[in-house]
Image: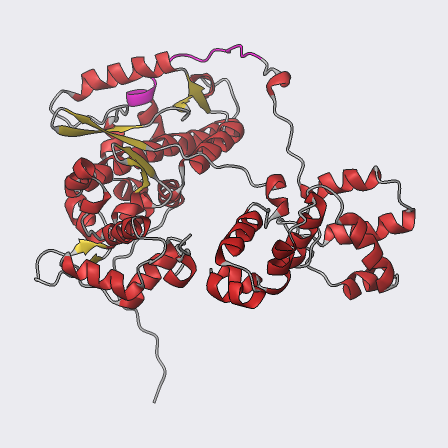
Amino acid sequence: MALELKQNLKLTQQLVMTPQLQQAIKLLQLSRLELIETINQELETNPLLEEASTSEMEQIRQGEGQEQGRDEEQIPGLAASEAEKTPWDKEAIKETNWQEVWDDEYRRSLPSYSFEEKEVPNYENIVASKSDLKDHLAWQLQMSGISDKDKKIAGFIIGNLDRDGYLKASVEEIAQDAGVDPEDVERVLKKVQEFDPVGVAARDLRECLLIQIEHLGIDDPLVKELVSKHLHQVELHNYQQIAKATGRSPEDVVKAIEVIKSLEPRPGRAYSSEEVQYIVPDIYVFKVGDEYVVALNEEDLPNLRVNSYYTEAAKNGDVSQKAKEFINEKMKSAVWLIKSIHQRKKTIYKVTQSIVKFQREFLDKGIAYLKPMVLKDVAEDVGMHESTISRVTSNKYVHTPQGIFELKFFFSTGLPRKDGSKDVAAQSVKERIKRLIESEDPTKPFSDKQIVEILAKDNIKIARRTVAKYRDLMGILPSSRRKRPKV
């Protein structure tokens, strides 16, 4: 069979993921804090991008609003230009004459370049970093007056503590690393355990509690006995068995356990370096009359615009060809960033509007009336792909009359009802289980099987293992560990 060369013509379609389209998709899935960080990075690296004041942006929006007409849909807090009405997937794959974009759209609306004086931050208002547990112990070690050899061993001990203050290395391992005898490590460990906070450097919960009992001078022998020999039974609330084993009355056992509860099981908690993360909603839902209004949260988000100084210089021929190419590249990047941010806001707004439409009953009455909903429901309603809805709802928060929720909260599968009517949302069932447990008799807590039977009376069909799963997700103990004795 002879080999030969042939030419074939083939027509195919494929999605071109341009850098601009990739940037738009990336911005869509960023959280609010990540978006602000990305914008600040672009402001530092792109000289054609600058932050406009609120009054300047208001003038731009008013000008754009007059040109757009009154028949178009307006999003509160966001004015869209003509270029932004073109879908970004189509815009991304076609060539754009950026000079015309500048002449026809941005130049007439943006003010000329000017310097703005800014106040220097007051360094007295800057909060000092919080010292963690190891820093606190190291300071006490330097003030302890022990020998340099013991300080070296104590340094190894402090270095092997977890964030709760427990020692995670054995005495033998520390002795090997420090090149000393295990007896020396034991001796220094006793000294470190005298440091603040009380109970630090313990090897387990039992030792931690015993250190605190000794330090606080608790002289009740029953308390020490419960911690030393019956800690597991205390955890299970098996008071009758503890009373039988110790030969004490249930009342005495309950009093001793109350003392144990007052101790700190995690000594390093007060020196945790974890910062509290405050949630700032991306969008607000307000009830005005009988209708719900959706509004974007524009607070703390920089207002971006294209700097006219460099573009004027490039247009007037005051710079070299290389500089013009640089300005053109940076201008393209700046315009795409602005348009991608505006498109991100539009998408979040539309998706939230759709969620409000589906979850009207939840907004009126609370979590018990949350409806089961999947990404496909919103995707079909707003005319977008499910992957886009997934990106929009990740790490985005909405403030509603019922509280602040992540947008993903509203998407959950449904559990069937026994009579075949509409399914009930899993989040609603979780809330019902939580309320049942909160209202139960502590001396006779509901078992998972009893919760299944109670929900069945409310026409909710659910398996016992599903109740156990939801209970674990909410951090609720099983009935055997929730039980309290009669006093």
In the rendered image, the vertical position of residue 336 relative to residue 1, given as above or below:
above
Q: Residue furthest bottom?
A: 1
User: In the rendered image, which quarter contains the N terminus?
Assistant: bottom left
Q: Is residue 199 visible?
A: no
Asked whether 110 falls inside the magenta stretch, the response is yes
Left-right relation of 102 to 156: left
Q: Residue at x 29, y 22 (%)?
A: 105
x, y percent for residue 89: 28, 44
Q: Nearer the viewer, residue 249 or 35?
A: 249
Q: Is residue 150 above or below residue 238?
A: above
Image mark count: 0
Instruction: Based on the picture, tell me whether residue 325 belongs to the magenta stretch.
Output: no
Which image quarter: residue 221?
bottom right
Q: Main secondary structure of the magenta part?
A: loop
Image-based side of 173 in relation to 394, left or right: right
Q: At which x and y percent is residue 222?
A: 61, 56
In the rendered image, the vertical position of residue 377 relative to residue 174, given as above or below? above
Q: Residue at x 51, y 32 (%)?
A: 41
Using the image as rendered, state which of residue 411 and residue 141 is in the foreground: 141
The residue sitting at 53% across, 31% down in the picture is 45
What is the span of residues highlighted in magenta in the rendered image? 103-119
- Figure quadrant of residue 173: bottom right
Residue at 48% x, 61% y: name it.
Answer: 239
Q: Nearer the viewer, residue 328 or 58?
A: 58
Residue 481 in sight: yes
Of 154 and 309, nearer the camera is 154
Q: Quadrant of residue 229?
A: bottom right
